[in-house]
Amino acid sequence: MPLDYVHDTQAVFRKVMDCMAQPGKTNSLAKQMCQIDFPIDCYHSTFLTMMTLLDSEATFHIKGNHTSLVQRIAQLTLAKHVEESEADFIIITADLPQASLIDAIQSAKKGSLIDPQLSATIIIETSELSSGQEWLLSGPGIKKEKRVKLAYSQRINQAREEKNKEFPLGIDLVITDQVGKVICLPRTTVISEVSK
Amino acid sequence: MTRLHQFAFFDEGSKKEIRRTILKAISIPGYQVPFSSREMPIARGWGTGGLQVTLAIIGQEDVLKVIDQGSDESVNAVNIKKLVEKTTGVTITEKTAEATIIQSRHRIPEQTLTEGQVLVLQVPAPEPLRSVEKSERQTKILHAEEEYSGAWLQLFEQIMKYGQTNTGADHPVYVAGRYVMAPSPIPRFDNHKMNHSEALILLGAGREKKIYAVPPYTDVRSLAFEDYPFTVESFATEACHLCGATDTYLDEIIDADKDKVYYQCNDSHHCLERVNGVIEGKGDISYA
């Protein structure tokens, strides 16, 4: 069965909304991923997230050299591909090095104090969620604190903290993986290293 | 079934815009995110904001409950339910615990909401500073600068005039220590239910074109002074004449013929469940 743009994107949205409301919670888009019956040059979970959130009123930027993917997404969603610093959604594919992500975090728009909603959401691909170093999350949406394993580094965390230091200004992260798992880290989430 | 309309009434573009707005609202708790509120088949001021939020998030598997002033059967709730049911075919329920989405006007249900549920509140006036500053541009600046003297002053003036704060409903709250937010016209009795709620709370104002949110497990503090602490409506000496509850929000009903005043639970479903013995309340009475 092909992807149902009404019901499948609704299901994806609810999963992403749930993740955003409860940072660190993992949801799976595997069911909707099975419906994609054409080759696409990024993770299917990333593709679904883009299909759910992008339209002609939103802008996006896919980092790296992904001309055909950019064309495909623009064709399917009618969203406009713009410079990284202007994009509502920035997509970091799995093939890019860590430095590209840090670069994206630094140049993404973070909104203004009057309009903090005019800020970017970064969709990050990671080969496998719930692997890697353990991190401690706290903030709105989290009961006391939550421990999650993320392929995330101290340098990325520093860049994120720097960007989000003046709440409500900041960026929101959506992390997707190959098997369809999603985690969201809105700007309110405080991430720290688990002390050993 | 022949479909005469798009699923959930809206075109996909409208849903996407509202969905993006909701995500931003969740990531900036208490901040009113502007959105391009659509024309709806009900009049503005009759829950179009809540309705738009509900239609943008609802899916075929959802179970919907709609209440108006605590009642599942009053006119606003029934009309909204009919519209959503006709355009989506979802299951409608009156049971608070069964619902995945609860759209409400003026109340948060008595039964505690749980993780995974979404409470959608209809908001007539989303701006807590509007009565002290009529310019939207100015109130946006006040929020940006976290300048909430106006909100405090309003409460202070009430104390000066009446010896206590007299907000009947919509008593302002501080969300996650940053934004002052109008919790929609819920009674003060319901304010504490927002604090560290397990359910996600989405608030939609259709006429004012704003969506805002309180994520689960978020600090929501009612504005109050040290020497004038926040108080809720008290029904200490009254009980519901139907179920005997003493721990719920009660309506005062005046029977002019008999010249009698009696009290009844405002949350009709909760009251019914108690009468039927499904829920046991703290103040259970014996009919023997």
Image (spheres, grey):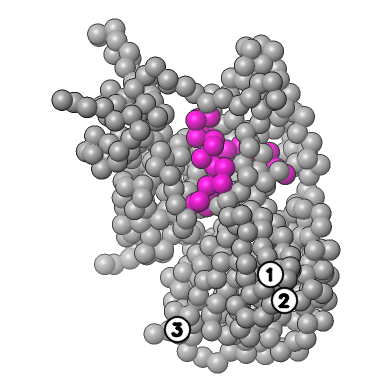
Comes first in the chain, label 3 or label 2: 3
- Outermost residue toward the left in this view: B288
Chain letter, disc 1 residue: A
Indicate the position of residue A195 as horizontal and vertical percent values. 74, 68
**Alpha-carbon span between mark 1 and mark 2:** 9 Å
Highlighted magenta segment, given as a residue range? B178-201
Secondary-structure class at tag 1 = strand
- Seen in the picture, residue B63 relative to A30 is either above or below; the reply is above
- Seen in the picture, residue A91 relative to B175 is either above or below; the reply is below
Question: Mark 3 vs mark 2: same chain?
Answer: yes
CB-based contact (under 8 Å), mark 1 and mark 2 = yes
Indicate the position of residue A178 as horizontal and vertical percent values. 58, 85
Q: Going by the image, does B131 lie left or right of A29?
A: right
**Type of amino acid at the residue the image marks with label 1:** Trp
Between B44 and A151, the one nearer to me in the picture: A151
Q: Which residue is mark 3?
A: A35
Mark 1 or 3, which is nearer the eye? 1
Q: Which residue is mark 1?
A: A135
Indicate the position of residue A112 as horizontal and vertical percent values. 80, 54
Question: Mark 1 vs mark 2: same chain?
Answer: yes
Dot 1 surroundings within 10 Å: few (below 14), some, or many (20 or more)? some
Identified at 68% across, 65% down, the residue is A136
Comes first in the chain, label 1 or label 2: 1
Q: Which residue is mark 2?
A: A152
**Alpha-carbon span between mark 1 and mark 3:** 33 Å
**Type of amino acid at the residue the image marks with label 3:** Gln
